[in-house]
Image: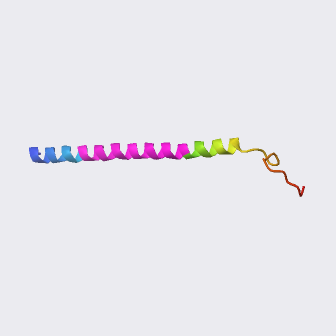
Amino acid sequence: MSTDAIAGTMVAMQAAETRMGLQAVMVKQQNQADQAVVDLLASAVQAAPAPGTGLLVDKTA
């Protein structure tokens, strides 16, 4: 195997490693964004008043 072929293989391997690293970072960031949305919705659901205990009085009840 020539040195050019070895160098080309090494460059290709390095590029693949870089792509895999970037993909891992992107997946991690997307997971964090999804978790933030879930946390936001969960806190909104927990903070909601129980049915029938709102601020307005239902005069038709």
Q: Which image quarter is the N terminus in? A: top left
Q: Position of residue 19 (x, y in %)?
A: 31, 47
Q: Residue furthest right?
A: 61
Residue 7 lies in what quarter of the image?
Answer: top left
Q: State left or right for residue 4 relative to residue 27.
A: left
Q: State left or right for residue 39 relative to residue 55.
A: left
Q: State left or right for residue 50 relative to residue 26.
A: right
Most foreground residue, 12 or 52: 52
Q: Which image quarter is the C terminus in? A: bottom right
Q: Position of residue 59 (x, y in %)?
A: 88, 55
24 is within the stretch colored magenta? yes
Q: State left or right for residue 41 relative to residue 17.
A: right
State how the image is colored: rainbow
**Residue 2 appears in the picture as rendered:** no
Give the residue drawn at x 19%, y 43%: 10
Q: How many marks?
A: 0
Q: Position of residue 56 (x, y in %)?
A: 80, 50
Write down the region rendered in magenta. Answer: 14-36
Most foreground residue, 59 or 48: 59
Give the residue drawn at x 19%, y 45%: 11
1 is within the stretch colored magenta? no
Give the residue drawn at x 59%, y 44%: 40
Q: Position of residue 50 (x, y in %)?
A: 78, 45
Most foreground residue, 37 or 59: 59
SS assignment for the magenta stretch, majority = helix
